[in-house]
Amino acid sequence: MRHIRTKLTLAMSVVAALVLTFTGIALMLNITVDYRRDFYADVKPILQSGTLNADNAAAAFESEQLSDKNCYLFKDGNIVMSTSGGGSVKETDNLRSLLSGGECSETELTDGVLDYGIYLGDGCGVYVTDTKAGLYSQIRGLSWQLAQALALGILLAVLISWLLSSRLTRSIKTLEAGAMRMADGDFSPIRLDTRDEIGSLCSVLNRMGEQIQRDYDEFEREEERRREFVANVSHELKTPITVIKSYSQTLTGMDVDADTRKQFLEIIDGEADRMSGAVSQLLELSAQTRASTLPPEHIDLVSLCRSVADGLNSKGLDISISGEGVVERDPSRVRTIVTNIIGNAIKYTEQGGVDITVCGSVLKVRDSGIGISTDDIPHIFERFYRADKARGRGTGGTGLGLAIAKECADVIGARISVVSELSEYTEFTVEF
Ligand code: ADP
């Protein structure tokens, strides 16, 4: 039994049959109760009227109330007149009592026969039993009506379940088709206009589909970032290698004067430095992504900035440090963030100076350098992004410094933001 439609039809038919069976039983019980009540309502008034005697018994037997019953007139224990045509009668408690001149009582249908009698005196008695003809005909009539009702009920059950199941299976089929579509990778929502359990199952599936689609998109983006990263790393390392190779080939293959040789060797040295810097930064980036955090330490931001700035200020820029603030964080990551931001401020500033302000757990580094364009600002934290590619290479940048700083900030729960005006200033704010 594979189809919902068949199951529903069968279930409804069984329900219809059960309802009709119980109704039938109730009606049958009613009929038998009424039958017994009618029997005694017909018999007792006549038998107990006090006017009944052996002479008018025959007329009484033909009366409307007794005509459909078996009536007997007994004289000294023998049947002298009967309406059933038979000369014998089944012996019951009432009959025995009557024949011995006693009184009769009402019996139940379950006793086998309904009977009643009255002793008239002089060895005479009238005894009446039911023929069950009326009862049987009523039961037959009822059974026929029940059979018709059952047939109609089953027909209706089939019809209704057919209609219901058509609607139900239509929703299920839509759902099934949608789920199969999702299994094939199409996560567009399933359209189903029902508010029942199938409707809510549909919205659960749709939500699941949306989530999978989101995860899938994120996975694709991540994959794309990874590909881009690998391409960038390759490019980043290939460029200095190409430069080194071409200059070294020139040096070995050509006769060059001492000045040119020195110049070429300086270029080779610079490119080797750049390559080594890029590799160190890549290692640093991967370490920041994987390394566990160190236990937090009290860090005086002002002294940290001072030591970092002193170590990086090879240009002799005017660097001012003011304010005060202490943070309790992973010291290694805080130092990496501060180093990269102050390092950039010095790297990208030729004139003027750098103002470093500390206020509680907020650090601001503002330089009067070349600035960053509004188009570049959203990308500067991406790996290998250089606002101006030519400029980046010129200044020895790899485009990894801010990505490393951002990675560290994410790990320790800090936030880095930037505002800048091209050729005017750049201000980085770190909220630890
Ligand atoms: P890089 O090694 O190139 O400096 P970063 O990730 O540190 O890489 O910075 C990304 C880019 O953001 C830089 O190439 C530079 O163009 C820009 N940038 C970062 N800091 C500054 C700054 N203080 N002034 C101007 N430009 C900056």
Image (cartoon, grey):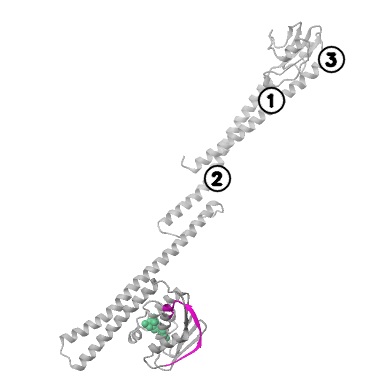
User: Residue 216, image x and y in percent?
Assistant: 41, 63
320 displayed left or right of 23? left
Q: Is residue 190 in view?
A: no
Query: Is the distance from the Cβ of mark 1 to the nearest ligand 1 atom less than 8 Å?
Result: no
User: Residue 286, image x and y in percent?
Assistant: 36, 73
Location of ligand 1 given as a quarter of the image: bottom left
User: Residue 247, image x and y in percent?
Assistant: 22, 85
According to the picture, the residue beneath numbered tag 1 turns out to be 32
Q: What is the quadrant of residue 161 in the picture?
A: top right
- Marks 2 and 1, how far apart at CA: 40 Å
Q: Per the image, is 329 magenta?
A: yes
| Amino acid residing under circle 1 | Thr
**Residue shown at the point (46%, 59%) measured from the top left:** 209
User: Residue 57, image x and y in percent?
Assistant: 79, 11
User: Who is closer to the viewer here, 431 or 232?
Assistant: 431
Asked if 375 appears above or below 15 in the picture, the reply is below
User: Who is closer to the viewer here, 127 or 283?
Assistant: 283
According to the picture, the residue beneath numbered tag 3 turns out to be 50
User: Who is closer to the viewer here, 332 or 109?
Assistant: 332
**Residue shown at the point (29%, 84%) measured from the top left:** 273
Q: Secondary structure at mark 2?
A: helix
**Residue shown at the point (47%, 39%) measured from the top left:** 1
- Nearer-N-terminus badge (2/3): 3
| Amino acid residing under circle 2 | Leu
Asked if 120 appears above or below 26 in the picture, the reply is above
Asked if 343 appears above or below 56 in the picture, the reply is below
| Amino acid residing under circle 3 | Gly
Label ID, residue 164: 2
Label ID, residue 238: none
Q: Secondary structure at mark 3?
A: loop
- Nearer-N-terminus badge (1/3): 1
